């Protein structure tokens, strides 16, 4: 996938050093942690380590994308979307996302996920807690198909020939 990936309202790009404060606010927010389980940094030193790793460029091998979502109008970071190789046999890749508390309910997660999915030629799955209606809505609105629920709600995207670019 060539970056930045441009949508009508967003630019999806690699993380940069100036994203640090936004990412701290994002990943230390209890509303984010509530649904992220053990995924993602939870304190400032962990965010620093994550950002150092993902700004170094050494892990950009085509099997992981760590994308910062920024508004096109002013380049304000509004969230994060991470996609990468999955250990689960459901699909080739899985993903996670989080939107900064001040930018929720604007449809940014759906817009970013839908754009990313159309540029990947691999199957991608995601899941959310049974009670997380907002994330289920994001995945459905991005065109993912819901699988039979287990202990979570699971969704799958299978690329069509016309999706991969």
Image: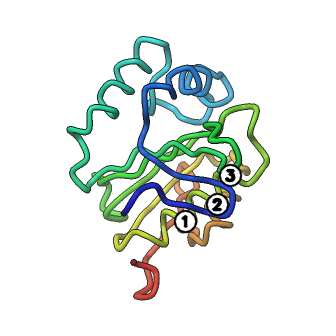
Specify whether 107 is left or right of 93.
Answer: right
Where residue 109 appears, as percent x and y from the top left, is 64, 52
Task: Classify mark 1: helix, strand or loop.
Answer: helix
Q: Residue furthest front?
A: 74
Q: Is residue 15 above or below residue 120?
A: above
Q: Whole-Å distance between the Cαs marked 2 and 3?
A: 5 Å
Q: Secondary structure at mark 3?
A: helix
Q: State left or right for residue 7 relative to residue 17.
A: right
Q: Going from the N terminus, do you reach mark 3 or mark 1 first?
A: 3
Nearest the eye: 121 or 152: 121
Which quadrant would the C terminus be assigned to in this image?
bottom left
Residue 159, x across and y down, in percent: 43, 78
Mark identifier at residue 111: 2
Residue 116 percent location from the top left of the image: 49, 62
Indicate left or right for 83 with 155 as reference.
Answer: left
CA separation in Å, label 2 and label 1: 6 Å
Within 10 Å of disc 3 (Cα), the crowding (few <14, some 14-19, many 20+) is many
Residue that appears at 60% across and 72% down? 143
Rounded to the nearest whole Å, what is the CA distance between mark 3 and mark 1?
Answer: 11 Å
Residue 100: quarter of image:
top right
Residue shown at 53% from the left, 63% from the top:
155
Which residue is denoted by mark 1 in the rendering? 115
- Comparing 85 with 73, the one in front is 73
Q: Which residue is tagged 3?
A: 108
Q: What crowding class fits label 2: few (fewer than 14 Cα within 10 Å), some (14-19), or many (20 or more)?
A: some
Q: Are marks 2 and 3 in contact (CB under 8 Å)?
A: yes
**Residue depicted at x 35% and y 59%:** 93
Could you tell me if the residues under marks 2 and 1 are in contact, i.e. CB atoms within 8 Å? yes
Instruction: Say which of 32 and 67 sits in front.
Output: 67
Can you name the residue that lies furthest to the right here?
105
Name the spot of residue 111 as percent of width and height, x first: 64, 60
């Amino acid at each position: 996938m060539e970056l930045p990936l441009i949508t009508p309202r967003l630019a999806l790009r690699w993380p940069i050093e100036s994203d640090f404060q936004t990412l701290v606010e994002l990943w230390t927010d209890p509303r984010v942690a509530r649904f992220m389980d053990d995924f993602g940094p939870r304190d400032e030193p962990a965010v620093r380590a994550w950002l150092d790793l993902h700004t170094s460029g050494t892990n950009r091998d085509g099997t992981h994308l760590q994308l910062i979502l920024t508004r096109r109008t002013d380049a304000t970071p509004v969230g994060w979307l991470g996609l990468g190789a999955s250990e689960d046999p459901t699909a080739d890749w899985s993903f996670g996302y989080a939107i900064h508390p001040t930018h929720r309910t604007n449809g940014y997660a759906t817009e970013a996920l839908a754009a990313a999915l159309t540029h990947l030629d691999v199957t991608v799955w995601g899941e959310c807690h049974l009670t997380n209606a907002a994330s289920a809505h994001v995945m459905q609105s991005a065109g993912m198909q819901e699988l039979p629920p287990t202990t979570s709600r699971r969704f799958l995207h299978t690329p069509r020939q016309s999706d991969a670019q």
